[in-house]
Each structure stands twice: as C-alpha cells, then as structure tokens.
Image (spheres, grey):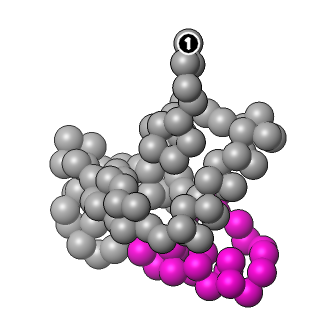
Amino acid sequence: MKVLLTLKERILLLNILPREGTLVTQKIVKNLRDRFGVSDEDWKTYGMEPIPEMPGQVRWDITKDIGTDFELGDKSLEIIKESLQELDNQKKVTEDFLSLYDKFLPVKDAV
C-alpha cells in the first residue's frame, strides 16, 4: 500500500511504534524508523530549526510539508495499525493523530 505521510505524521508514528516485540517485528520497526526518521534533506527542505525556549523541540515551515509517499508492506501496515489501536485502547488519541487514523484505521460514519 502506498501512503502519503507528512513530516508531522512521520514523527508521530515514530513515537508510537513498539519498542519491544518479536525479532521480525523489531526488524520491521527498525526499517520504519530508518525510513520515517528526519533526514538532513528534511531539515533543509522544511526549514527546520530548534526552538531555543523548548529544548528538544523543532519547528518547520508546514506550508512546504506536502508529504512523502511511502510504500508499506502488509506486516508494516499491521504494526502501524496495532500501534494506533493500542493508542486508542489506552484513550490517548489526540487531535494530532486524527489524520493517521483516517489513513490507516478509518472510522465509518464518525460524527
């Protein structure tokens, strides 16, 4: 499946991927982390810069963030969907994640 992910969505996914699991799961997670991770090119393309008053946080020009296409296999999709489902089960979904749910776990007839 091909999916278009913005930089923000990539960062959000990096934060919810499982830190433990089977050997196969962790190899796939490592591959996803490598692919979704922020590159030097991203820093230049999006004009990313650290926020001095918020150590560890960055800002970027969201008008330049039109997204990047990623081809995801069945097991990668399964891991992402399970991670999003777990977030929902823990009742920790925030508005930031809604676009990811629309892409990976669309809710039919939502209000």
User: Which residue is located at x 62 percent, y 53 percent?
Assistant: 81
User: Which residue is located at x 58 percent, y 79 percent?
Assistant: 28
Q: Nearer the viewer, residue 47 or 17?
A: 17
Residue 10 in which image quadrant: bottom left
Identify residue for label 1. Answer: 111
Residue 82 in which image quadrant: bottom right
User: Which residue is located at x 45 percent, y 44 percent?
Assistant: 103
Query: How would you rate the neighbour count of disc 1 (Cα within 10 Å): few for under 14, some for 14-19, many for 20 or more?
Result: few
Q: How many marks?
A: 1
* Residue 2 place in picture, x, y as percent: 35, 60
* Residue 27 place in picture, x, y as percent: 62, 85
Q: Compared with residue 23, is residue 38 higher up or lower down, i.e. above or below? A: above
Q: Compared with residue 53, is residue 2 higher up or lower down, i.e. above or below? A: below
* Residue 78 place in picture, x, y as percent: 62, 62
In the current view of this chain or complex, which residue is farthest to the top?
111
SS of the residue under disc 1 = loop
Q: Is residue 36 something that shows in the picture?
A: no
Drawn side of residue 88 relative to residue 28, left or right? right
Q: Which residues are magenta?
A: 14-36
* Residue 68 place in picture, x, y as percent: 28, 59
Is 108 inside the magenta-drawn segment? Answer: no
Q: Nearer the viewer, residue 90 or 75?
A: 75
The type of residue carrying mark 1 is: Val
Task: Please identify the quadrant where the C terminus is shown.
Answer: top right
Q: Compared with residue 89, is residue 40 higher up or lower down, i.e. above or below? A: below
Is 20 inside the magenta-drawn segment? Answer: yes
Give the overall secondary structure of the magenta segment: helix
User: Which residue is located at x 79 percent, y 40 percent?
Assistant: 89
Task: Please identify the quadrant where the N terminus is shown.
Answer: bottom left
Q: Is residue 74 something that shows in the picture?
A: yes
